[in-house]
Image (tube, rainbow, N blue to C red):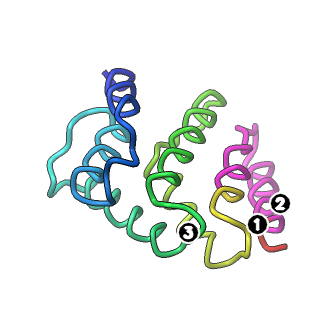
Amino acid sequence: MKKLLTILALSIPLSTFAVDAEFTQKVADISVGYVVERDSLPYKRAKTALENVEKLCLEQTAEKTANQSEAASQVLRKHNISANIIDVLEVVATLKPQTQQSCQDIITQYAQLRENATHTDATVQLNALYKTLKK
C-alpha cells in the first residue's frame, strides 16, 4: 500500500502544488503509509515540518525539499534506519539554523547515516554529522 501511495504521489508533479493542505496531505499520507485525517498527528507534523523548511530553505522550494527527503528516507530504510519524509524534514528544520550548509547538503549528510552496532558508534556518527554541518 505504501509503495502504491508513493508511486501515485510521485506520478503527479509536485511543482503543481503549493505548500497547502493538499500537498501537506500527500506528504503525511506517504510518510505513514495510509490516508490520514487532517486533524491527525502525522498531518500536523507534516504541516509544521513543511512550514519550517519553507522558512529556512530559501535556496529551494518546500516541495523540492520534500522530494529530496523522500529519497533520503528510502536510502535510510535500505540501511535499516526507520525514517520517513516527515522525520527527514524535521531533521532539516532542526539542523538548518545551526549551519550555513544548504538544505540539500543537510539531507545528503543525513542520508549517509548507517545503522551501527552500539550506541557509542551512533553517537560518534551523529557528532561527525554535526561537526560537518557546523563548518
Q: Which mark is residue 130?
A: 1
Q: CA distance from mark 3 to mark 2?
A: 22 Å
Q: Which mark is residue 4?
A: none
Give the magenta part as a residue range. 107-132
Residue 108 located within the stretch drawn in magenta: yes
The percent position of residue 86, horizontal first and vertical second, equals 43, 52
Residue at point 47%, 43% (across, down): 84
Q: Residue furthest bottom?
A: 97
Residue at point 57%, 38% (across, down): 71
The percent position of residue 127, horizontal first and vertical second, equals 79, 63
Which residue in the structure is indicated by mark 3? 57
Question: Residue 91 vs residue 29: left or right?
Answer: right
- N-term mark: 3 or 1: 3
- Label 3 sits on what residue type? Cys
Callout in the foreground (3, 2)? 3
Tell me if mark 2 has few (under 14), some (14-19) or many (20+) residues whose alpha carbon lies within 10 angstroms of its own: few
- Label 2 sits on what residue type? Ala
Q: CA distance from mark 1 to mark 2?
A: 5 Å
Question: Residue 129 vs residue 4: left or right?
Answer: right
